[in-house]
Each structure stands twice: as C-alpha cells, then as structure tokens.
Image (spheres, helix red, strand yellow):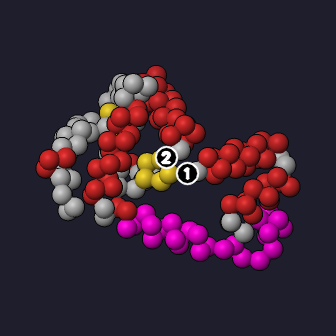
Amino acid sequence: VLLVLFPGLPNVDSYLLELKRSLLEECDYNAEKESLQFFKEKSRERFPQIVIPEVYPEFCTTTILTMEFIEGDSFIESKKYPQDKRDHLAQLLYDYHNFCFYELRTLHSDPQYGNFLFTEDSLRLLDFGSVRSFSQDFVSSYIELLKSIEKKDLVLYKKVLIDFGFF
C-alpha cells in the first residue's frame, strides 16, 4: 500500500536523527532528573495510582542519579493478576499515555517492560532517560492522521505523512 501512495523509498533521516537524540539523552542524568520531577509533579493529582520515584537532587550529579527505591511486580508477574485488575491497569496506562501526549505533549519514550513495575492497584514508572516532547502542531497533525485512518481518507493520510516528513 505504501508504495502505491508513495513511490520510491521512505526518507529515514529523521528516524536516524531521533535515534541519535534519544541515545544521547539516555546518558544525561540531569535531564532524567528533571523529567522524573516533571512527570511526578504533573501526574500526582490526576493519577494517584501512577507511582514515580522521588528524586534526591542533593545526591545527584552529572554521572549519578539518586532516587527512591520502589518495588513492584514485573510485567510477567502482573499477567497472573485477576482479569479485572489487569483491565484496570491497562486502562490506567492508556489514560495516562493519552494525558501525557495530548495534554502534556511529552511522553516517556522508552516503554519496554523493564521500565514498569506493577501492583494490583498501581503502575510504577521507571527510567525517564528517554523523554520526547511534541509541539501543539505535531499533536494536531497526529489527530488528523488518526481521523484519516478512521475515515479511510487516503488523501488526508498522504498529506499528513508528507507534512510529518515521512516521505
């Protein structure tokens, strides 16, 4: 389908630049400390079941990040929870992701299993070394992309992808 809409090869330059940016960011403990504090502050009232470790800035340096030790179950262990608990956690994660993207316009951008811990009632987020912020224009264009998919509007779909610089 993509070759019909976009003859030729996709431009991967933006993907490579993003990979470079995120790898460098993973090594910046000051940025991670700020991201932890940002998400904790913005999330605390609306998402009390989202636990983000407390940072101890007085014990942090450019090469050391000191934060609260929190415990929880791995993703694999959480699969043993009762279905209603798993449903609740999945909804919590979905709602939190939407809040972060559409309202904060900033995402925890390393959603691999090791960066989450679980209890039957809470989600614990770890490793804020990779965070991505988005402009309001980007978020609005993304919404247009979703609309184009829902309406099966290939003209709008192509326009948004070109505006994103994918092709």
Task: Give the farthest residue toward the top.
Answer: 84
Q: Position of residue 45 (x, y in %)?
A: 39, 24
Q: Amino acid at mark 2?
A: Thr
The image shows a total of numbered marks equal to: 2
Whether residue 167 appears in magenta in the rendering, the answer is: no
Q: Position of residue 24 (x, y in %)?
A: 37, 67
| Nearer to us in this view, 122 or 20 | 20
Task: Give the farthest residue toward the left.
Answer: 59
Q: Which mark is residue 32?
A: none
Q: Position of residue 78 (x, y in %)?
A: 36, 35
Q: Residues within 10 Å of mark 1 (few under 14, many from 20)?
A: few
Measure how far apart labels 1 and 2 are at the Cα level. Answer: 6 Å
Residue 4 in view of the camera? yes
Q: Secondary structure at mark 1?
A: loop
Q: Is residue 46 left or right of residue 74?
A: right
Q: List the residue tagged with mark 2.
A: 106
Picture residue at 52% right of the left edge, 32% below the top? 95
Mark 1 or 2 closer to N-term? 2
Picture residue at 58% right of the left edge, 51% below the top? 135
| Nearer to us in this view, 68 or 90 | 68
- The quadrant in which the C terminus is found is bottom right
Q: Are marks 1 and 2 in contact (CB under 8 Å)?
A: yes
Q: Position of residue 72 (x, y in %)?
A: 27, 36
Instruction: Decide whether the magenta segment is chiefly helix, strand or loop.
Output: helix
Picture residue at 48% right of the left edge, 34% below the top? 96
Q: Residues within 10 Å of mark 2 (few under 14, many from 20)?
A: some
Q: List the residue tagged with mark 1.
A: 134
Q: Amino acid at mark 1?
A: Phe
State which region is magenta. Answer: 1-24
